[in-house]
């Protein structure tokens, strides 16, 4: 038990340090993330030291239940592919340009419109896709307009990591925790709508207050270049995404696991896109780029962290943690603790850990479900506090370096702390209200 805890604590510390000081290493022409190499090495050590039997790992990883990590990865990658392909077609950039083209006397008008668009798109895609899509755009137009990019960048980042709570597909942590509790697509919306709305409204009000001086300044921006969209492929992609979300919403009534649905639509899109390029005798460059943009490093990272958490479960550490966190009001224990742990080991490993802690046999029924939703809130809002808190934060900081936008770890925490704590509090308060209305 002690050795497992020591290895996992050291892993968490090293992952955090790697993100801050050495996020990538170069091997030949490739840049490789250090965070997943550390977690993979730790998982190998756990197995080699026989802390965790290999047959136990295989049994849990091939479990036919919805918490199977392979099913979760398929679900996440399928939805990510549908969104990335739309981005490769220029759809999100097209929407963003439409906003910029409108006349704005003050920066605050553009800020609010961007916040709304980012929020809406996050609901129906995922926070990671929005971060990858809008961050380069914001960096470019802020530089062109010679304005402070920070209000827009933090507005985008906080919006993406707030409204990602609304649907189960908004964040891989939502998917993992909700599926571990067999929460359906529609049940999830009913509960998380209120906390998301509360958090979204408060976060934007806090951002408006923090950046009030910058947002009062005049805005003079060049008209962006027109983006030429491939209409047939765009129509096919939008139909796939919309239908996928609709069927996910009714999946529990159809008795279909969500990963079947998302995988089916992803494969269908690939077949139709290949058919289109075959008919038009063109190369499927957008399809190739979409596949290359998929976050493949997430696979060894998630599977490695799953092994580390299984070690805690096998040595009964998670049971002891469940005893500590199991109180009369799990919202007050699971919510804040998951927020803190996210910023120590990242929100994906945190979700794997809390998925093991939050077991029906450790909690009464009502507390178990409230604990799941509290951990989901902590995993999303946890991204606010430090860049380590979420995969989205790691990607966001790496993109800013490319565009020479300087945001230090300290500055991120300064703005993050001002928004994160009150937003977390009101989101958990919203969950408490929803528990009386829905649960």
Image: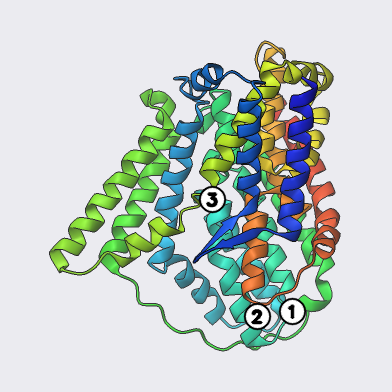
Q: Can residue 439 be seen in this view?
A: no
Seen from the viewer's position, the closer of residues 76 and 192 is 76
Q: Residue, x 44% and y 63% (percent of image)? A: 87
The part of the image, by quadrant, that contains residue 309 is top right
Q: Can residue 328 be seen in this view?
A: yes
- Residue 371 lies left or right of residue 184; in this view the side is right
The part of the image, by quadrant, that contains residue 235 is bottom left
Q: Name the residue under label 2.
A: 142
Residue 126 numbered tag: 3
Residue 58 pos. (x, y %): 50, 22
Question: For the residues marked 1 and 2, what is the alpha-carbon distance in whole angstroms?
Answer: 7 Å
Q: Residue, x 29% and y 68% (percent of image)? A: 231
Question: For the residues marked 3 and 2, what is the alpha-carbon distance in whole angstroms?
Answer: 24 Å
Q: Residue, x 59% and y 83% (percent of image)? A: 103
Mark found first going from the N terminus, 3 or 2: 3
Seen from the viewer's position, the closer of residues 25 and 379 is 25
Number of numbered tags placed on the structure image:
3
Mark found first going from the N terminus, 1 or 2: 2
Placement of the N terminus among the 4 image quadrants: top right
How dense is the environment of label 1, judged by Cα within 10 Å: few (below 14), some, or many (20 and up)? some
Q: Are marks 1 and 2 in contact (CB under 8 Å)?
A: yes
Q: Is mark 2 on a helix, strand or loop?
A: helix
Question: For the residues marked 3 and 1, what is the alpha-carbon distance in whole angstroms?
Answer: 26 Å
Against 381, residue 68 (above or below) is above
- Residue 106 lies left or right of residue 136; in this view the side is right
Q: Name the residue under label 1.
A: 148
How dense is the environment of label 2, judged by Cα within 10 Å: few (below 14), some, or many (20 and up)? some
- Residue 407 lies left or right of residue 84; in this view the side is right
- Please name the colour scheme applied to the rendered image: rainbow
Residue 175 numbered tag: none
């Amino acid at each position: 038990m002690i050795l497992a805890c020591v290895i996992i604590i050291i892993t968490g510390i090293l992952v955090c340090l790697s993100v801050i000081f050495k996020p990538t290493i170069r091997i030949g022409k490739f840049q490789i993330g250090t965070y997943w190499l550390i977690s993979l090495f730790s998982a190998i050590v756990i197995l080699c030291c026989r802390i965790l039997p290999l047959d136990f790992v295989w049994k849990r990883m091939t479990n036919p239940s919805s918490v199977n990590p392979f099913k979760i990865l398929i679900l996440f990658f399928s939805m990510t592919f549908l969104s990335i392909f739309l981005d490769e077609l220029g759809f999100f950039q097209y929407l963003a340009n439409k906003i910029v083209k409108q006349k704005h006397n003050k920066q605050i008008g553009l800020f609010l419109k961007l916040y709304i668009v980012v929020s809406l798109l996050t609901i129906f895609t995922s926070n990671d896709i929005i971060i990858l899509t809008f961050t380069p755009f914001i960096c470019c137009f802020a530089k062109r307009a010679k304005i402070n990019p920070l209000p827009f960048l933090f507005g985008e980042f906080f919006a993406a990591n707030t409204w990602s709570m609304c649907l189960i597909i908004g964040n891989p942590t939502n998917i993992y925790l909700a599926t571990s509790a067999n929460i359906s697509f529609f049940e999830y919306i009913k509960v998380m709508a209120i906390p998301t709305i509360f958090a979204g409204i408060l976060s934007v009000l806090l951002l408006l207050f923090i950046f009030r001086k910058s947002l009062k300044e005049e805005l003079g921006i060049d008209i962006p270049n027109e983006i030429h969209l491939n209409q047939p492929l765009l129509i096919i992609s939008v139909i796939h995404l919309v239908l996928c979300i609709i069927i996910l919403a009714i999946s529990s009534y159809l008795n279909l696991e969500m990963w079947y649905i998302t995988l089916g639509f992803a494969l269908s899109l690939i077949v139709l896109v290949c058919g289109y390029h075959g008919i038009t005798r063109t190369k499927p460059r957008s399809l190739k780029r979409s596949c290359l943009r998929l976050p493949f490093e997430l696979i060894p990272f998630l599977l490695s962290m799953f092994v580390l958490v299984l070690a805690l479960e096998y040595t009964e550490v998670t049971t002891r943690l469940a005893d500590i966190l199991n109180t009369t009001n799990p919202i007050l224990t699971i919510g804040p603790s998951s927020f803190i742990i996210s910023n120590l080991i990242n929100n994906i490993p945190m979700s794997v850990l809390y998925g093991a802690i939050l077991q029906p046999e450790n909690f009464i029924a009502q507390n178990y479900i409230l604990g799941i939703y509290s951990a989901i809130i902590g995993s999303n809002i946890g991204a606010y506090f430090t860049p380590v808190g979420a995969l989205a934060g790691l990607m966001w900081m790496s993109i800013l370096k490319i565009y020479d936008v300087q945001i230090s770890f300290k500055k991120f925490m300064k703005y993050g702390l001002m928004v994160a704590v009150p937003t977390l509090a009101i989101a958990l308060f919203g969950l408490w209200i929803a528990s009386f209305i829905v649960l």
